[in-house]
Amino acid sequence: MPNILLVEDDSALSELIASYLERNGYQVNVISRGDQVRERARVNPPDLVILDLMLPGLDGLQVCRLLRADSASLPILMLTARDDSHDQVLGLEMGADDYVTKPCEPRVLLARVRTLLRRSSLGEPQTASDRILMGNLCIDLSERTVSWRDQLVELSSGEYNLLVVLARHAGEVLSRDQILQRLRGIEFNGTDRSVDVAISKLRRKFDDHAGEARKIKTVWGKGYLFSRSEWEC
């Protein structure tokens, strides 16, 4: 049974979310203070964290940064205020894999949880021979690790999933809508910045600077292109 750590100081909301997830087969541990999360996660490692932004003790952005420092692969789902794109982008920059705006429908939250867990090692067993090789890039689908020029690259769960989607469609232009459909099974709503933020972070980690990006190219008005020839250089 997947173990979820829910960090939310609104007792009514946390009770609603926890009971709904438990009815759907998840074990849920609830914490109401941000400064207690890191220790709890170390003592009882969760399979996924649902993290509110506004918390006593330590805010959600700081907590997210600390959790990501401890684990590059832990799925983190952020709860943000409705239509607050600033907080959404900050959360993604700090290492969150996805976000849901409050007030949220429990079934929407459940769908995001299932998607993140399905795309983590918990839900996608692979054979040891499953690899994507492209020049100096090696994506090990069994270990969920990425190496570049013989050096391991630390990626969050969301960054890893995006890299796999792009690499599997090397040479194709993928729109934001197509990327989100493959990552989360949802349509692009015109304001979701998660893909752009994650692309920017991948570029930085692979020395593919935005102004002259060649490995992950922006095709204006269409989407992104993962250039096989540039990765094989």
Image: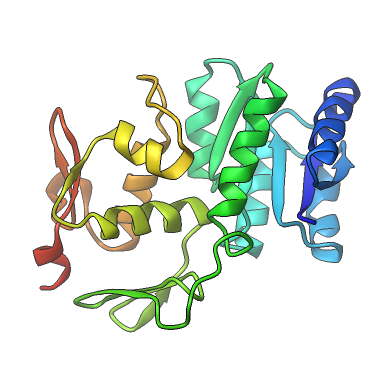
Q: Nearer the viewer, residue 190 or 7?
A: 190
Q: Position of residue 179 (x, y in %)?
A: 34, 40
Q: Quadrant of residue 71?
A: bottom right
As drawn, is 187 to the left or to the right of 166?
A: right
Q: Nearer the viewer, residue 166 or 212?
A: 166
As drawn, is 149 to the left or to the right of 24?
A: left
Q: Quadrant of residue 191?
A: top left
Instruction: Please tell me whether residue 113 is drawn above or below residue 68 in the rendered image.
Output: above
Determine the residue positioned at 83% across, 23% down: 13
As drawn, is 72 to the left or to the right of 205?
A: right
Q: Nearer the viewer, residue 28 or 231?
A: 28
**Observer able to see residue 57:** no
Instruction: Please tell me whether residue 63 is drawn above or below residue 205 in the rendered image.
Output: above
As drawn, is 194 to the left or to the right of 71?
A: left
In the rendered view, how is the structure colored?
rainbow
Q: Quadrant of residue 138?
A: bottom left
**Observer able to see residue 1:** yes
Q: Position of residue 110 (x, y in %)?
A: 67, 35
Q: Position of residue 106 (x, y in %)?
A: 72, 25
Q: Position of residue 153 (x, y in %)?
A: 42, 70
Quadrant assignment for the C terminus = bottom left
Quadrant assignment for the N terminus = bottom right
Determine the residue positioned at 85% across, 25% down: 16
